[in-house]
Image (cartoon, rainbow, N blue to C red):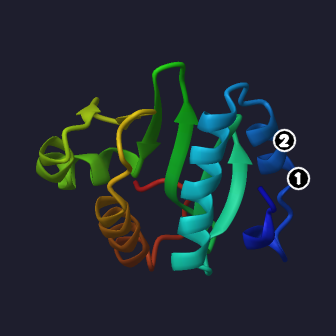
Amino acid sequence: MVFWFWEGFHIEELKGYLDKIDDPNHRERMEEIFSWILEKFPNLKPELKWNQPMFTDHGTFIMGFSTAKQHLSATPEEFGMAHFAEDIAQAGYSATKGLFRIKWNEPVNYELLEKMIKFNILDKADCATFWRK
């Protein structure tokens, strides 16, 4: 996949992360999600912190991702997880207090991702720290 959606960003770290995903289908799924996020939210900055790809806005965390053998994980912070617990359950995703899992063979609920990202952008508009306090 061409990384057209990352023009203007220093994305070598994220590209390196994606390149380490052995399964080409899993790598393509992550590229697809990242493309969608940056197309929908061009103000977000893709970053790699603690070896995890994430998106920030004015230096504050908005959404992070990780990969595992059976699924990818997404986290909108614990506050976001609590706020969207019912939506996550209705989407059929398993969850912990810090993340929810999307199995590789399940569709991505982009409507839910969009709601979470919009919520975090608005809720953290005046946040001056990386994490909520």
Examine the rendered structure and indicate whether residue 45 appears above or below residue 102: below
**For the residue carrying disc 2, how many other residues have a C-alpha within 10 Å: few (<14), some (14-19), or many (20+)?**
few
Q: Is residue 50 visible?
A: no
Disc sitting over residue 131 in the figure: none
In x, y percent, where is residue 41?
54, 77
Q: Nearer the viewer, residue 31 or 126?
A: 31
In x, y percent, where is residue 66?
56, 35
Disc sitting over residue 16 in the figure: 2
Instruction: Return the residue at label 1.
Output: 12
Q: Amino acid at mark 1?
A: Glu
Q: Secondary structure at mark 1?
A: helix
Q: Amino acid at mark 2?
A: Gly
In x, y percent, where is residue 44?
61, 72
Query: Is residue 117 rendered to the left or right of residue 83?
Result: right
Which quarter of the figure has residue 56?
Answer: bottom right
The residue at the point 12 percent across, 47 percent down is 90
Query: Is residue 87 rendered to the left or right of residue 3?
Result: left
Query: Is residue 25 rendered to the left or right of residue 72?
Result: right
Examine the rendered structure and indicate whether residue 22 appears above or below residue 1: above
Query: Is residue 19 rendered to the left or right of residue 106?
Result: right
> Label 1 vs label 2: CA separation?
6 Å
In which quadrant is the C terminus drawn? bottom left
In which quadrant is the N terminus drawn? bottom right
Q: Nearer the viewer, residue 79 or 110?
A: 110
The residue at the point 30 percent across, 66 percent down is 111
In x, y percent, where is residue 78?
33, 44
* Pointer 1 with pointer 2, Cβ within 8 A: yes
Q: Secondary structure at mark 2?
A: helix
